[in-house]
Amino acid sequence: MTQLPEFTIGIEEEYLLVDADTFDLVAAPDSLMAALTGALGNQVSTEFLNCQVEVGTGICATIAEARADLGQLRRTVAELAADHGLRPVAASCHPFGDWKQQGRTDKPRYEQLDDDLGAVARRMLIGGMHVHVGLPDQDSRIALMNQLSYFLPHLLALSASSPFWQGRDTGLASYRMAVFDSMPRTGLPPRLRDWADWESRVQRLVGLGVIEDSSKIWWDLRPSGKFPTLETRICDVSPRLADTLTIAAVVQALTRTLCRRTRNGQPWRESDPIMVQENRWRAQRYGVSAGLIDSAADRIVPMPQLMDELLDLISEDVSALDSVAEASRIADIARSGTDADRQRALYHSAMDGGADTHDALCAVVRALADDFTAI
């Protein structure tokens, strides 16, 4: 059998910047961006809204390498932000920030996005985590995208970190998805035949003048337009580094599992798009608290059971990738709750202690900022 690829990994995270005292959103000063660029080079960049920054690891062979790289990125962002009276937060929505009060970063590409999408783009006061897994063969990227789509709701459920929006509890575990889905060319990817099918669809949209390139296709999972990778984009950004690494380890291992099974003539069963879409909604709404539809069993299965089954499925591959410890934490998340659950608990604890709504939400942001560089 042909040797399996190395399944290198890269992680991108989007952060919000808040005032260290008031926890209000603050635009990144030019001096901070200059300091970040000086320290981190092309591993840091601005985002559409000027209260956000994005970081990306290098190409990592293992989760241990990703831990070292992303940990250093987080520490550097936190230290340099502190020099400007700011703190970074890795949560997909600011609990009380108002998108209408945020400014746009002054760059031609963001001006074009504003022109193209209007208020839909301006409302993107959200942050996500993207996980790239290296797959040199182009057709393999498409075949594995078709199979990995089944597991996207599982990943969203585990990562949910955005229960609040503009000072209110939305009732959702990931309100980020409700905001992001207002953008065009988002959601679950369609089933594609092969790389030529993907390229023909991209080129048709480019030829029509709808997009400039494939980077304007914002599916939950896509072939990267920059790198020879499959890019998982569905996840909320995680306040704690440990959760980021857990989810990234599962994405990496799942990709290896599905590749190995495909080469052994056992590809993952073709998924019913209606059921996967329903699971995506259930993950967005409930996180890990209400279970997902198991299409094979034709019933809703609790998340702890699903995560145990997922760990069984990828057990050979987490061992091969030396990520058993990181991946195994999905069982803990499924049983103890997501970060969205934790934020709600912090909010209600503050309210029970006599805080008003704003102060309770500030307590949530303070905890998120404290978690940013926690090991």
Image: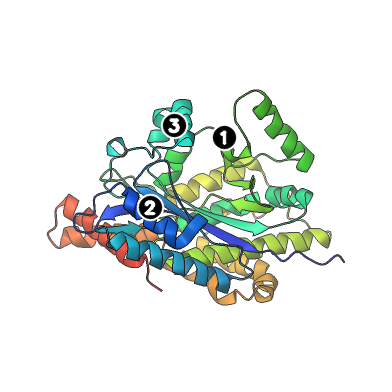
Whichever of callouts 2 and 1 sits on the residue coming sooner in the sequence is: 2
* Mark 3 residue element: helix
Asked whether disc 2 touches disc 1, contact meaning CB atoms under 8 Å apart, the reply is: no
Q: Tell me which residue sits at (29%, 35%) in the image.
A: 100
Q: In the rendered structure, which amino acid carries the disc numbered 3?
A: Glu
Q: Tell me which residue sits at (60%, 26%) in the image.
A: 210
The answer to whether residue 50 is left or right of residue 196 is left
> Picture quarter containing residue 197?
top right
Quarter of the image for the C terminus: give it.
Answer: bottom left
Give the residue at mark 3: 111
Give the residue at mark 1: 185
Q: In the rendered structure, which amino acid carries the disc numbered 2?
A: Met
Please identify, in this view, whether the residue under mark 3 or under mark 2 is nearer the observer: 2
Judge whether residue 85 can be spotted in this image. yes
Give the residue at mark 2: 33
- The spot of residue 32 in percent (x, y) is 34, 54
